[in-house]
């Protein structure tokens, strides 16, 4: 048994877990021509073709990351099996982001429960008529929810506190927005790329000072599926794959309840746990690709500082000379995919390491890191380390 921070993983098998197939559909502001179930079916079908597996014959378990409140109905696992080929098969629905789902899949495989596991997540955010109501419902019910503060209000307060305590400035935030939008222009999966200037960001409408419209990732819709297998299964069946070296997820106290403001405890601890699991001896600058959460622009800087450890190291990464930071455009460029946001980052890194990222391909990429955050009001997130 391995224990690190708040993560506990029981390892009964040796070897890595491998990503042997990917599939996706959508990646538009609104996917009006497909229902949630059709979106899932299309993504799953492409993933099974990519992995050359039959879901009813080869897959031992299925995992779907979905939250009832975002779906508009309760017990969403009843709506999942038929769409991803899991009817009558072991299925776990997890109300969490996809790094947690990935960790569950890894445990299924390393514990011997299954040799092949399917991980799915999706966003049909346009179907949710009052997103603020959903986010407020997620808040702590006795003290925070009665305030009626939206996620944007809380984000504005945190952004102000972060800028006051971290050493980063509003100009740094402006550049993060410009960078994400510019990168997204080259990504066919991005809905919100554009030629923004720092002046454009500065003049953006205020949501909750100092947070502006340009600082918030707009919602988008997509379905994403990964097929995972044990290293032994992948070798035996001659599958080309991307390895998962380490994965961890953690929780920390949200800032409004007394948590830290300049860094994120969940990001720091998840990174520490994941690199320990991976046996990684370098530092953050030794990764070829970082796909970090930027649901809000300042969170990209906060997460980067949390993982890099020092402001100097974070600024070196921001310079772009050695490590590619959010080459996909991040959520600011691609869109906020809710519970599927982390799975989008995993997808992008898998495509990069397979050399299939097209116009956004990072030359020679061999090691990538994905970091997730579940969004306000939570202090939860995770880290996954991938290599080729």
Image: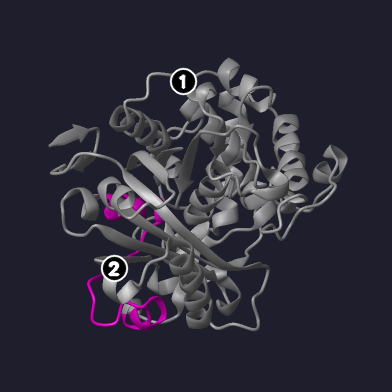
Q: Residue at 58% across / 50% down in the picture?
A: 295
Stretch of the chain drawn in magenta: 78-106
State the image quarter where residue 243 is shown: top left
- The image shows residue 267 at horizontal and vertical percentages of 42, 36
Q: Nearer the viewer, residue 111 or 341?
A: 111
When asked about the image quadrant of residue 73, the answer is bottom left
Residue 216 x/y as whole percent: 66, 52
Answer few, some or many: residues within 10 Å of disc 2's Cα (few below 14, many 20 plus, some between 14 and 19): few
Find disc 1 in the rendering and name its residue.
283
Res. 306 mark = none
Cα separation, mark 1 vs mark 2, equals 38 Å
The quadrant of the picture occupied by the N terminus is top left
Q: Is residue 251 visible?
A: no
Residue 16 makes an appearance in the image:
yes
Q: Is residue 270 magenta?
A: no
Question: How many numbered circles does the render carry?
Answer: 2
Residue at the image point whose x is 62% and y is 47% from the top: 330
In-image side of 199 versus 162 (left or right): right
Tell me the residue at 43%/48% (across/down): 241
Residue bearing the label numbered 2: 58
User: In this rendering, which labeled residue sits more in front, label 1 or label 2?
Assistant: 2
């Amino acid at each position: 048994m391995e224990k690190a921070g708040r993560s506990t993983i029981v390892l009964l098998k040796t070897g890595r877990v491998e990503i042997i197939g990917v599939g996706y559909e959508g990646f538009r502001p609104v996917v009006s021509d497909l229902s949630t179930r059709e979106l899932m079916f299309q993504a799953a079908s492409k993933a099974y073709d990519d992995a050359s597996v039959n879901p009813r014959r080869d897959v031992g378990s299925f995992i779907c990351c979905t939250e009832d409140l975002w779906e508009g109905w309760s017990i969403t696992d009843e709506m999942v099996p038929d769409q991803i080929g899991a009817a009558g098969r072991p299925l776990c629905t997890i109300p969490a982001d996809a790094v947690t789902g990935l960790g569950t899949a890894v445990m299924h495989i390393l514990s011997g429960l299954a040799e092949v596991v399917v991980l799915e997540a999706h966003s049909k955010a346009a179907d949710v008529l009052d997103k603020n109501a959903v986010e407020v419902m997620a808040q702590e019910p006795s003290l925070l929810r009665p305030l009626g503060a939206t996620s944007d209000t809380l984000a504005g307060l945190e952004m102000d506190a972060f800028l006051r305590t971290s050493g980063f400035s509003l100009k740094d935030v402006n550049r993060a927005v410009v960078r994400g939008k510019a990168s997204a222009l080259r990504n066919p999966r991005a809905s919100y790329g554009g030629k923004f200037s720092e002046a454009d960001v500065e003049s953006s409408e205020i949501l909750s000072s100092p947070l502006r419209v340009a600082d918030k990732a707009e919602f988008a819709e997509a379905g994403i599926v990964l097929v995972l297998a044990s290293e032994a299964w992948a070798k035996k069946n001659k599958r080309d794959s991307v390895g998962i070296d380490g994965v961890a997820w953690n929780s920390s106290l949200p800032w409004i309840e007394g948590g830290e403001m300049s860094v994120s405890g969940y990001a720091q601890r998840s990174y520490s746990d994941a690199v320990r699991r991976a046996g990684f001896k370098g530092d953050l600058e030794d990764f070829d690709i970082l796909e970090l959460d930027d649901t809000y622009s300042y969170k990209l800087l906060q997460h980067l500082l949390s993982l890099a450890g020092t402001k100097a190291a974070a600024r070196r990464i921001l310079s772009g000379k050695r490590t590619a930071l959010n080459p996909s455009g991040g959520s600011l460029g691609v869109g906020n995919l809710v519970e599927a946001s982390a799975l989008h980052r995993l997808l992008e890194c898998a495509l990069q390491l397979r050399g299939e990222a097209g116009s956004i391909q990072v030359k020679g990429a061999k090691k990538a890191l994905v970091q997730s955050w579940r969004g306000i009001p939570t202090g939860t997130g995770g880290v996954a380390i991938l290599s080729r």
